[in-house]
Amino acid sequence: MKTKEKVQDKTKEKKKEKKKEKEKVKDKEKSKDKNKKEKVTPKDKEKDKEKEKDKQKVTIREKEKEKMFLQEKSKEKEMDKIPQKEKHALKDQTQYKDIEKQKVKEIREKKGREEGVKKDKQSQKEKYFEKKDEKENKKHHDKDIEQEIKKEKEKHKEKEKISIIEKDKHSASSQSIQTQVSDTPHSYSKSTDSNKKH
């Protein structure tokens, strides 16, 4: 009996411990949830809003699909009420409308393509002329540079000529001074000699 009671007590204790552990886990989860709620940032709020918007979009799409489906069904019902001859006529009309729509679509697409081609050609032309202008400008610029270089060379030549002339003048004047100096003593000596003779 005593052993049975002991076993029962042990199992009761174990059950109590398990209960306590469960409660602890629950408390932890509750605190986590609380923390999560407290830690909600503006970004999280925005994300939630976006999610909500996406959900609404999905529901709107589904509603639209449903609407379309119901419209199709109602059309079919109406068509069932119409006699066979009129049905064929309506079918022809809808086919004609579809063909017209297709034609309009094709014309628009063609126009769009043509406009695109035109724009491409225009841009190509503009690019070509821009390149041409750039080349022309470069040519003119190069010519201007060449002319400037020529002018500089000519100026340099003129300067060299002037310097040579100046040198020649200087050397000629120095030579004439030397000849004058060399001439004067002879005449002086001659005059003294003549004086002596007298």
Image (cartoon, grey):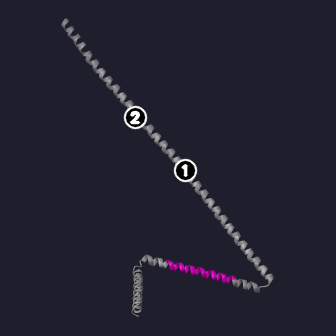
Q: Is residue 136 above or below residue 163?
A: below
Q: Amino acid at mark 1?
A: Lys
Give the total number of marks visible in the rendering. 2
Q: Main secondary structure of the magenta part?
A: helix
Residue 164 figure quarter: top left
Q: Left or right? Give the position of 106 relative to 59.
A: right
Q: Left or right? Give the position of 184 relative to 28.
A: left
Residue 193 lies, in percent from the top left, at: 21, 8
Residue 191 lies, in percent from the top left, at: 22, 11
Q: Left or right? Give the position of 60 relative to 8.
A: right
Q: Nearer the viewer, residue 9 or 21?
A: 9
The answer to whether residue 126 shows anywhere in this view is yes
Q: Is residue 2 above or below residue 70?
A: below
The span picked out in magenta is 50-72
Residue at image location 40% in from the left, 34% down from the top: 156
Q: Left or right? Give the position of 157 relative to 59.
A: left
Residue 138 drawn in magenta: no
Which mark, residue 156? 2
Q: Amino acid at mark 2?
A: His
Residue at image location 48% in from the left, 79% down from the top: 49
Q: Is residue 60 above or below residue 168?
A: below
How far is mark 1 from mark 2, CA to CA? 37 Å
Q: Is residue 11 above or below residue 128?
A: below
Q: Which residue is mark 1?
A: 131
Residue 114 lies, in percent from the top left, at: 65, 61
Residue at image location 60% in from the left, 57% down from the top: 122
Residue 15 lies, in percent from the top left, at: 42, 88
- Looking at the figure, which quarter contains the N terminus? bottom left
Residue at image location 47% in from the left, 43% down from the top: 144
Q: Nearer the viewer, residue 2 or 8?
A: 2
